[in-house]
Image (tube, rainbow, N blue to C red):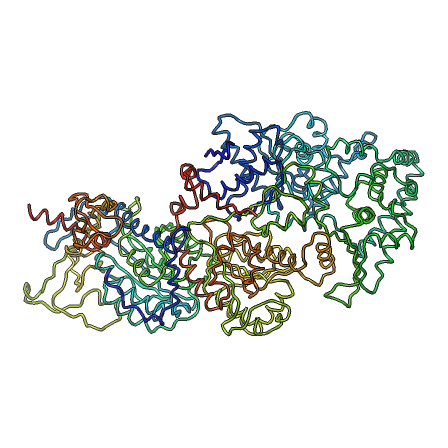
C-alpha cells in the first residue's frame, strides 16, 4: 500500500499495516526532518524492520541529497540476512508499483569467514584463521614479492577483483551474503573486498555493530562513509556494553607469555632483515620522522570517521625518537612487557587510574607517556616493514600495544584493575589486568558527531531517558510504542509468594533459604503441568541455577517435573547449549513438552527466539542483577555517579530490568503468538522495578496480578491458555490491530494512532 | 442444546473473575471480545457445515426386504469413528466437576446417543490411553447400548501416567484401515494431558494417517498443544480447546454432524440390504430359534440371543437382531428405511437463514417460532417464506428440526 506520512509518499510492501508501524514511521520521519538522533522502542514482532526500511528508502528517493545512505547495524548474521530479505520485498514492491527498476544498491557485509569463496581459505573453521590466511595471500607486500617470485601462492579472486573489479561498480540490486558470493563466483572476484569497496557507493549497507563501533575495525571499513547518512542500531538495548567491550583490554599471564614469543620473533626478524636488507629499515625510519602527516591531511577534510583510539593531536606529531628505530622499539616493548609481568605478580587487588599507572611506569622503568601513545601505530608500521604475513599470530603483541596507546591517551573514563585471582576460586592464582572502559560514550561519540541522524531502536529500551544519558547525546525524538492487540496475547504475572505465604525472592539474604527454593520448584512443577509444549525458565546466574537445581534434585521436585516435561539446561559451553536447544525444540515439536533452564544474560536470553510453541511461558526466577561485587562494575557505577549523576541503584535496576524484559520478550514474537510471562520475585511488584519494564508489558500488568501466590498463578494461566487456544483468524484482527489503507485513513483511527506513541 | 446443568455452588466453583467480564470495551481486546469471536465462530460453523453439502439423490429401490443401490454423496453418511479418551493423570484435575474424567464420560455418553440419532448407519468405537499404553474399550460397532454400558463402567478407571498419542492412533488405524473407502474414517481424541509419550516419531504416523485418509480431530481440555495442531491440520480435522463445561459439550456436539467428504470418493454406488423384521414362525412351521450372527463372537453373554424372529440378510439369510449392521457373512450393509430417512437431512439441509440487523424489520419485532421479542442485534430470515427468527430458534431449527416450521405450515395451509 502507499502511505502518506506527513507529505512523504511511502511504499509499504504489505496489504495491511499495524497502527503502531504507522506511528513509528511518523516519529522516524520527524527525526530525519530534524537531522537529529532518535531513540525508539517498539515491541518485537510488530514489524519494526520493514517500517524503518520503508520510510528511510522513501526518504532517500524523495530527498536524494539530504540522505544519501542508510547504514543499518544489527547484531548477528541471521538478523542481517533477515533485514536484507525484508529489503528485497520492499524493492520488489517498488518495482511493481512504479513499473521500473530503481537503481538502489543495497548489500550486506560480514566477516571474511562468511564471505570467502577461496576453496582452501573458506574451509577453515575459525574467523581468525580465515582472516590470517586471507591476509597471507593478499597483503600488499606479499603481492609485490610475487613479482619476483611467481611461485608464491595467490588468491585468484582477489587478483581478479584488484585488476578489474574497482572500475565497474556493482550493478544495482539487493545483495545478501549468498548473493555476493554467487556474484563473486560468477565474476571470479573476491566478494569480501568487493563488498567492502561497494559500501562506499551503496545506498543501503547492512552490517554488524562492530564495523561502526569497534575502533580497530571501523577505521578499516567505515572510514569513508558519507556524512549525510542515516545510521540505525537495531536491537540496541545492549549498545553501551558493546561500546565498552570494544574499548576494554584484558591481559592475563598467557597473553604476556604469547607476547614474549611475539617480541622474540620480531627481534629475530629484525636481525635477519638487517643483514639482508638494511635499506628497508632506513626507509621506515625516514617515514616515521615525517610523522603521520598523511593521515592528518585526510582527517582535516573531515571525511573520515575519527578514530577514538588515536586522538587528533597524535597525528600531528612525529613518532618520538626513542622508538623510531626498530631495535629500540623492540627494546621498548620488552621493557614494557617486563613491567606488566611484574605488575601481575601481585598478591592483592590493585585498582588505579590511568595517570597513576603512567606515573608508576615512569618511576619503575622510565617509560614516558609519549612513546606509549605511539605504541600501536609504531607496531603496525613495524609489522608492515617486516612483511610478516600472518597477523593473527601477533594478536598478543597488538593487544599490548593497543593497551599502551589507550592507557596513555585517556586519563578519564578508564580504570585499571589487577586481580591476583578470580573471586570464585580464591586459591588458584590467575592474575588478570583489566583495563576497563567505563564510559560507553567514548566509542560511540564519533558516530554521533559524524552522521546526521542516528536511530537507536529495540523492543526493550525502557526507561528511554537513560540511554541518551549514558551514551552522552541529545536525541530529538524519544518514543515508546505499544502493541495494539485484538486479543490480550501476553499475560505478565508477578508471583510474590508461595502457597505457604513464603516471600519469593532471589535476593542475597534468602538465596540459600530452602523454603524459597522449594517454592520456586513448586512453581515450575505446577506450571509444567498446565503449560503446553515449551517453557523457558531463566535464573539470575549459573551458580544460582546450579544450586537450585541441585536442591530440587534432592527434594525430588525434578523427578516430578520430568513426568510432565523433559528438562534441558543451558551451560556456558556453546556446543552443549546448542545441542540442548535442538533437543528442546524437538521435544516441543513432537508433543512431549520440554523445559529449558537457562540464564539471563546468557546466549539463550539474547539471541534465540522462542516463537509459538517453543515458548508458551517464560518464568523469570529472581531479578537478574549483575554480579555487584565485581570491581569493574563498582568502578563503572562510581564513574556513572560522578560523571552522569546516575545513582548506582538506578543503573543496577535499569540493567536488571532490561535483561528481564529481554528474557520474557523471547516468548512473544508477533501478534498471532501468545505467551505467559511469569516474574517470580516479589520485588518486581515495586514501582521502581515495574516502572522500568517496557510500556507494552507494563500496561498489561493489572493491579490484581502484582503479588500472586502459586495457586492463583496457575488459575490465571489456565484461564489465559484456554482463551488463547480459541480459534483466532486474521479477520478478528482487522480494524483493531491490523489495518487496510481505508481503515488507516479514517479520522478515528488517526486519532487513536497518535496515542500509541508515548513521548518521554 | 437442552437446559444448563445446575450450577455448582459458587464456593465450589473455580476462580470466577467476574469483574473482568464487566470491563468496558474501549480498549477493544477484552474478554467480551473473545466472546464475540466465539459467537462468530458459532455462526460460521453453522454456515460452513451447510454449504459443504451438495445435493445428491437417494435412488434406492426400496422394495420389500431387498437390496438397493445408494449413491454415495459428498457428505459421508456412513461413518466409522474411533473416540480416544485420555485417561492419564491429568484427567483427575478438578477444573471440570467432579473431575475431568467423570465429566468427559458423561458428555460422551450423550454424544453417543446424539451420534446414533443423527448417523444411524454409522459405527463408533472407543479407545482409552494411559500409562503410555492404549487399550480398546469397545470395538467399532453400531450398537449404542453396548457403548454406553462400557462407558459407564469406565467411570471407575484409575487415571495414571501419561497418554500415548502414537499408540492410540496406531490402534485406531489397525481397524480403520480395513473400512471401505466410501465410508468416512475418523478419529476423535479427547486429550487432557499436555504431554504424550510416544515410542516412535509421530510425524511418520501422521503421514500414514494422511495417506489412509483418516481424519483426526482433537478436543483439548487444557491448552493448545503443537503436535495436535499439526495432526489436525494435516489430516483435515478440527482442533478445539474447551473454555468450560458448556463449551465442551458444544465442541463435542460439533462432531455429531458428518464431516464433508473429500472429492475423491472411491465409488459412487454401494449396495445395501433392507431386511424386514420377520418372525419365522408365521411363515414357516418348522422354524427353530436361532442365534443372531452379531452375538456369535461377542464375549458379553448378557442376553443369549436365541430367538425366533429377526432381520434376515436379503443376500445370505444370516440373522441379526439389530440394525444397522454390516453382514458378517457377505459384508452387505443392512439398514432399515427409517435409518436412511434419518440421515436424509444431511443430504437436503435447510438453507441458511439470512442475518440482518433488527432495525430493518418493519412492524412488530417478535420471533415467529418462540413468539418472543427480538432482543438481540440481529435476526434471521428464512429465504423461502421470509419469516423471521431469533438466534436461539435459528440454531434450534438448524440443529434439531431440520425444516422451517413456517414453510411447512404454509404448505399445509395451501
Q: Is residue B358 above or below residue A505?
A: above
Using the image, determine if residue A420 lies above or below residue A195: below
Tally of numbered tags: 0
Instruction: Identify whether A212 is placed above or below A344.
Output: above
A600 over A288 or under it: above or below: below
**Can you name the residue that lies furthest to the right here?**
A275
Of residues A224 and B157, the one drawn nearer to the viewer in this rendering: A224
Which residue: 49% across, 60% down?
A: A593
Relative horizontal placement of residue B156, taking residue A715 as reference (left or right): left
Does the image show residue A485?
yes
**Is A632 displayed left or right of B101 in the figure?**
right
Please state the horizontal and vertical placement of residue B333, each as a whole percent of the image: 21, 55
Identify the residue at image location x=53%, y=49%: A43
Q: Position of residue B373 (x, y in %)?
A: 20, 53
User: Which quadrant is the N terminus of chain A positioned in?
Assistant: top left
Which image quarter: residue A653?
bottom right
Amino acid at each position: 500500500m502507499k502511505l502518506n506520512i506527513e507529505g512523504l509518499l511511502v511504499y509499504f510492501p504489505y496489504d495491511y499495516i499495524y497502527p503502531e508501524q504507522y506511528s513509528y514511521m511518523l516519529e522516524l520521519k520527524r527525526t530525519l526532518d530534524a537531522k537529529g538522533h532518535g531513540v525508539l522502542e517498539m515491541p518485537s514482532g510488530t514489524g519494526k524492520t520493514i517500517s524503518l526500511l520503508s520510510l528511510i528508502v522513501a526518504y532517500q528517493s524523495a530527498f536524494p541529497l539530504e540522505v544519501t545512505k542508510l547504514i543499518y547495524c544489527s547484531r548477528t548474521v541471521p538478523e542481517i540476512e533477515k533485514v536484507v530479505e525484508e529489503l528485497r520485498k520492499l524493492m520488489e514492491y517498488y518495482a511493481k508499483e512504479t513499473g521500473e527498476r530503481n537503481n538502489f544498491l543495497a548489500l550486506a557485509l560480514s566477516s571474511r569467514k562468511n564471505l570467502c569463496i577461496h576453496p582452501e581459505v573458506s574451509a577453515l573453521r575459525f574467523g581468525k584463521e580465515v582472516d590470517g590466511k586471507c591476509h597471507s595471500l593478499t597483503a600488499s607486500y606479499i603481492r609485490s614479492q610475487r613479482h619476483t617470485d611467481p611461485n608464491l601462492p595467490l588468491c585468484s579472486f582477489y587478483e581478479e577483483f584488484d585488476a578489474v573489479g574497482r572500475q565497474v561498480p556493482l550493478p544495482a540490486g539487493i545483495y545478501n551474503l549468498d548473493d555476493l558470493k554467487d556474484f563473486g563466483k560468477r565474476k571470479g572476484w573476491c566478494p569480501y573486498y568487493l563488498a567492502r569497496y561497494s559500501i562506499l557507493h551503496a545506498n543501503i549497507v547492512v552490517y554488524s555493530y562492530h564495523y561502526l563501533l569497534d575502533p580497530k575495525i571501523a577505521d578499516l571499513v567505515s572510514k569513508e562513509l558519507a556524512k549525510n547518512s542515516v545510521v540505525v542500531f537495531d536491537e540496541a538495548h545492549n549498545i553501551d556494553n558493546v561500546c565498552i567491550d570494544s574499548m576494554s583490554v584484558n591481559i592475563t599471564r598467557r597473553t604476556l607469555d604469547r607476547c614474549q614469543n611475539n617480541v622474540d620473533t620480531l627481534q629475530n626478524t629484525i636481525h635477519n632483515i638487517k643483514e639482508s636488507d638494511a635499506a628497508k629499515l632506513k626507509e621506515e625510519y625516514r617515514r616515521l620522522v615525517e610523522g603521520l602527516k598523511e593521515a592528518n591531511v585526510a582527517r582535516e577534510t573531515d571525511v573520515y570517521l575519527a578514530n577514538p583510539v588515536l586522538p587528533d593531536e597524535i597525528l600531528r606529531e612525529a613518532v618520538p625518537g626513542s622508538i623510531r628505530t626498530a631495535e629500540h622499539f623492540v627494546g621498548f616493548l620488552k621493557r614494557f612487557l617486563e613491567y606488566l609481568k611484574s605488575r601481575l605478580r601481585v598478591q592483592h587487588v590493585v585498582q588505579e587510574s590511568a595517570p597513576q599507572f603512567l606515573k608508576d611506569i615512569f618511576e619503575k622503568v622510565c617509560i614516558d607517556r609519549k612513546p606509549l601513545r605511539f605504541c600501536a601505530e609504531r607496531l603496525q608500521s613495524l609489522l608492515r616493514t617486516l612483511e610478516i604475513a600472518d597477523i593473527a599470530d601477533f594478536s598478543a603483541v597488538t593487544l599490548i600495544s593497543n593497551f599502551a596507546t589507550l592507557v596513555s591517551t585517556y586519563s578519564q573514563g578508564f580504570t585499571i584493575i589487577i586481580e591476583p585471582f578470580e573471586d570464585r576460586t580464591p586459591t588458584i592464582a590467575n592474575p588478570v589486568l583489566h583495563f576497563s572502559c567505563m564510559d560507553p560514550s567514548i566509542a560511540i561519540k564519533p558516530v554521533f558527531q559524524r552522521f546526521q541522524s542516528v536511530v537507536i531502536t529495540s523492543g526493550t529500551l525502557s526507561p528511554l531517558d537513560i540511554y541518551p544519558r549514558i551514551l552522552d547525546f541529545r536525541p530529538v525524538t524519544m518514543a515508546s510504542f505499544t502493541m495494539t492487540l485484538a486479543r490480550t496475547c501476553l499475560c505478565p504475572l508477578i508471583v510474590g509468594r508461595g502457597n505457604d505465604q513464603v516471600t519469593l525472592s532471589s535476593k542475597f539474604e534468602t538465596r540459600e533459604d530452602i523454603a524459597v527454593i522449594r517454592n520456586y520448584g513448586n512453581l515450575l512443577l505446577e506450571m509444567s503441568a498446565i503449560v503446553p509444549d515449551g517453557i523457558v525458565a531463566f535464573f539470575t546466574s549459573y551458580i544460582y541455577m546450579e544450586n537450585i537445581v541441585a536442591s530440587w534434585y534432592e527434594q525430588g521436585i525434578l523427578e516430578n517435573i520430568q513426568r510432565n516435561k523433559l528438562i534441558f539446561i543451558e551451560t556456558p559451553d556453546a556446543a552443549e547449549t546448542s545441542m540442548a536447544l535442538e533437543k528442546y525444540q524437538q521435544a516441543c515439536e513432537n508433543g512431549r513438552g520440554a523445559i529449558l533452564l537457562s540464564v539471563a544474560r546468557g546466549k539463550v536470553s539474547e539471541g534465540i527466539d522462542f516463537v509459538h510453541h517453543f515458548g508458551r511461558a517464560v518464568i523469570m526466577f529472581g531479578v537478574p542483577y549483575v554480579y555487584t561485587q565485581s570491581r569493574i562494575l563498582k568502578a563503572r557505577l562510581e564513574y556513572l555517579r560522578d560523571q552522569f549523576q546516575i545513582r548506582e541503584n538506578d543503573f543496577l535496576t535499569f540493567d536488571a530490568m532490561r535483561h528481564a524484559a529481554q528474557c520474557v520478550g523471547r516468548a512473544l514474537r508477533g501478534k498471532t503468538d501468545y505467551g505467559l510471562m511469569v516474574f517470580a520475585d516479589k520485588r518486581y511488584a515495586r514501582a521502581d522495578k515495574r516502572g522500568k519494564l517496557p510500556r507494552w508489558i507494563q500496561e498489561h500488568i493489572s493491579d490484581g496480578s502484582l503479588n500472586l501466590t502459586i495457586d492463583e498463578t496457575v488459575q490465571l494461566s489456565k484461564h489465559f491458555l484456554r482463551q488463547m487456544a480459541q480459534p483466532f483468524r486474521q479477520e478478528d484482527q482487522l480494524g483493531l490491530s491490523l489495518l487496510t489503507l481505508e481503515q488507516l485513513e479514517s479520522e478515528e483511527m488517526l486519532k487513536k494512532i497518535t496515542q500509541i506513541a508515548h513521548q518521554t | 442444546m437442552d437446559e444448563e446443568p445446575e450450577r455448582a455452588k459458587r464456593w465450589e466453583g473455580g476462580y470466577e473473575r467476574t469483574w473482568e467480564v464487566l470491563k468496558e470495551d474501549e480498549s477493544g481486546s477484552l474478554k467480551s471480545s473473545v466472546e464475540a469471536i466465539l459467537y462468530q465462530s458459532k455462526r460460521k460453523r453453522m454456515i460452513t457445515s451447510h454449504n459443504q453439502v451438495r445435493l445428491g439423490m437417494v435412488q434406492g429401490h426400496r422394495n420389500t426386504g431387498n437390496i438397493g443401490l445408494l449413491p454415495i454423496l459428498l457428505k459421508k453418511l456412513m461413518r466409522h469413528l474411533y473416540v480416544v479418551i485420555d485417561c492419564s493423570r491429568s484427567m483427575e484435575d478438578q477444573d471440570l466437576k467432579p473431575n475431568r474424567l467423570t465429566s468427559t464420560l458423561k458428555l460422551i455418553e450423550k454424544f453417543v446417543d446424539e451420534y446414533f440419532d443423527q448417523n444411524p448407519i454409522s459405527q463408533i468405537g472407543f479407545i482409552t490411553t494411559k500409562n503410555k499404553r492404549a487399550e480398546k474399550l469397545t470395538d467399532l460397532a453400531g450398537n449404542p447400548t453396548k457403548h454406553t454400558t462400557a462407558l459407564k463402567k469406565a467411570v471407575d478407571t484409575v487415571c495414571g501416567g501419561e497418554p500415548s498419542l502414537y499408540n492410540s492412533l496406531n490402534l485406531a488405524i489397525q481397524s480403520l484401515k480395513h473400512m471401505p473407502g466410501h465410508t468416512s474414517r475418523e478419529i476423535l481424541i479427547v486429550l487432557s494431558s499436555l504431554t504424550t509419550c510416544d515410542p516412535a516419531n509421530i510425524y511418520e504416523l501422521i503421514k500414514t494417517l494422511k495417506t489412509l485418509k483418516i481424519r483426526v480431530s482433537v478436543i483439548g481440555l487444557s491448552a493448545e498443544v503443537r503436535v495436535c495442531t499439526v495432526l489436525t491440520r494435516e489430516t483435515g480435522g478440527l482442533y478445539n480447546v474447551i473454555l468450560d463445561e458448556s463449551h465442551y459439550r458444544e465442541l463435542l456436539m460439533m462432531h455429531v454432524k458428518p464431516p464433508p467428504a473429500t472429492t475423491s470418493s472411491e465409488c459412487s454406488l454401494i449396495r445395501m440390504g433392507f431386511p424386514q423384521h420377520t418372525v419365522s414362525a408365521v411363515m414357516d412351521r418348522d422354524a427353530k430359534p436361532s442365534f443372531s450372527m452379531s452375538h456369535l463372537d461377542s464375549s458379553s453373554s448378557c442376553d443369549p440371543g436365541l430367538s425366533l424372529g429377526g432381520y434376515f440378510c436379503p443376500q445370505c439369510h444370516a440373522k441379526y437382531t439389530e440394525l444397522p449392521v454390516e453382514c458378517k457373512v457377505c459384508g452387505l450393509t443392512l439398514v432399515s428405511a427409517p435409518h436412511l430417512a434419518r440421515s436424509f437431512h444431511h443430504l437436503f439441509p435447510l438453507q441458511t437463514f439470512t442475518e440482518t440487523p433488527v432495525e430493518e424489520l418493519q412492524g412488530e419485532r417478535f420471533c415467529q417460532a418462540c413468539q418472543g421479542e427480538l432482543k438481540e442485534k440481529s435476526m434471521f430470515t428464512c429465504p423461502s417464506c421470509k419469516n423471521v427468527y431469533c438466534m436461539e430458534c435459528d440454531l434450534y431449527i438448524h440443529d434439531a428440526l431440520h425444516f422451517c416450521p413456517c414453510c411447512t405450515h404454509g404448505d399445509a395451509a395451501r
